[in-house]
Amino acid sequence: MFLVYINDFVTLFAHYGIKIKLLFADDVKLYVKVVDYSDVAKLQQALIAWYTWAAVWQLGISVDNVLLIGKVGSIGQFCINGIPLPVVTECRDLGVTITHDLSHSSHISDIIFKAHQRSNLVHRCCVSRNPNLLVRAFVTYVPPLLEYNALFGLLIQKTGYHTC
């Protein structure tokens, strides 16, 4: 039954010329380039159709979780059921910080900051100054931060969205 919903959802947005890029369970990511007012109107019509579709299928849309990423003031005001959607310049989703210009410098800065914090924590919390124990604690707690979503930056570089 869930596949029926998903297929119908993809078809709905395709009708408005919007391709769904990421679809995972009940989480959807739409990427739409808004250049002029016709794009604004098309996206707003798609949002209205989405709300109508959800109402027909008796599904709720969590409007609080809907964000528009873009330069504030550069795109029009979008609404779902009369509720205006917030426009933000960056968003953190599934551990990855995405900015309006698809730059990954903010994401990398966050990772480096957290790794630095955790390495200092390892240094402060270990009572023993045994170098082998400190190295083992560091290797256990810091590299996972650096390795999580490490392919994200490579993917952006490979697809040509590198802006850093």
Image: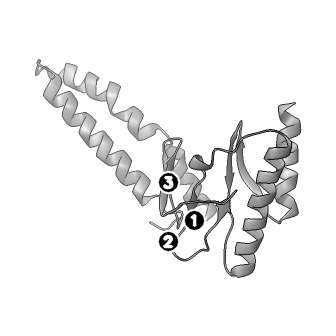
Residue 31 percent across, percent down from the top left: 67, 61
Instruction: Tell me the residue that label 3 is attached to.
Output: 91
Instruction: Identify residue type, mark 2.
Output: Val
Instruction: Identify residue type, mark 1.
Output: Tyr
Location of residue 125 by image quarter: top left
Residue 72's tag is: 2
Left or right: 129 in relation to 62? left
Give whichever of 45, 36 is nearer the camera. 45
Q: Secondary structure at mark 3?
A: strand
> Closer to the N terminus: mark 3 or mark 1?
3
Location of residue 49 by image quarter: bottom right
Q: Residue furthest bottom?
A: 36
Residue 76's tag is: none
C-alpha distance separating marks 3 and 1: 17 Å
Residue 120 percent across, percent down from the top left: 19, 36
Task: Identify the residue at image location x=40%, y=52%.
Answer: 108
